[in-house]
Image: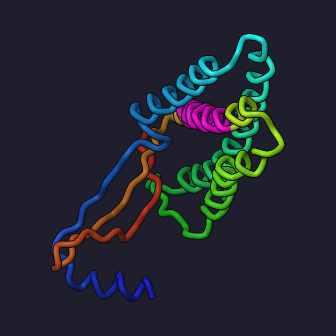
Amino acid sequence: MERRMVKKEKSQVSKNFTQERRYAGGVSQHIFSAILILLSALILFAITSMESLANVFLNMLVISILFLATILIIRIIVFVKDSKRVLASDALKSPSAGGRNLLKGVGLSLMLALALFLPFVLTYFIDMQTWIAMVLGAIAGYGFSDLSFTIYVRNWEKRNRIRLFRYNVCVITAENKSLIVEVGILGRKT
């Protein structure tokens, strides 16, 4: 159904263009991740008494490491597949295959669901400081995974002398609407 609609719209195309952005995020995304980590730690220290700080911090650290490991592994698995396709292409351009990102989508959705709902389920069984440590640990774990993944990708780019970008090929239809017709990864030799 969607392919037919794209073909129908292509006959009415007046202009096309490509949008690009750095793969694995830009500076603003890194700043946002760092702020998430910092705020999580500051909130934890602000609401925790000195007697229980070590225990609550340990809970936050464990949850952060679990989130970091799970999200990072999923993102690296997807990246390895993407990077192999880019290197195999003479043009260093690889359109995305739709179902391939299913692992990333399902994995990240499960982690988000756990982060949001597990603390509420455990509310009756754990004390408030542990509950907050779990939520803040999930937030900090996401921030750490984002920064770690970016470092991984940048190291890959240096090793292969390629700078990666995500791209969208868009067209402007006769109705003046932007329609994305292709999404993928683009590599440029450095």
Front residue of 82/138: it is 138
- Using the image, determine if residue 112 lies above or below residue 131: below
- Single out the residue that lies furthest toward the front: 124
Count of marks, rendered view? 0
Front residue of 153/70: it is 70
The residue located at (76%, 24%) in the rendering is 56
Image position, residue 190 (x, y; %): 42, 34
Q: What colour scheme does the image use? A: rainbow
Residue 149 visible, this orientation: no
Q: Which residues are magenta?
A: 135-156
Front residue of 184/30: it is 30
Quarter of the image where the N terminus is located: bottom left
The residue located at (42%, 46%) in the rendering is 165
Image position, residue 78 (x, y; %): 63, 53
- Single out the residue that lies furthest toward the top: 50
- Using the image, determine if residue 67 lies above or below residue 17: above
- Using the image, determine if residue 43 lies above or below residue 143: above
The residue located at (16%, 73%) in the rendering is 176
Q: For residue 43, what is the image quadrant?
A: top right
Was residue 97 drawn as part of the magenta stretch in this picture? Answer: no
The reply, left or right, for residue 163 in relation to residue 56 is left
- Magenta segment, principal secondary structure? helix
- Using the image, determine if residue 20 lies above or below residue 55: below
Front residue of 77/157: it is 77
The residue located at (57%, 56%) in the rendering is 85
Image position, residue 172 (x, y; %): 21, 71
Image position, residue 68 (x, y; %): 69, 37
Residue 71 visible, this orientation: yes
The reply, left or right, for residue 113 in relation to residue 87 is right
Q: For residue 28, what is the image quadrant?
A: top left
Was residue 148 drawn as part of the magenta stretch in this picture? Answer: yes
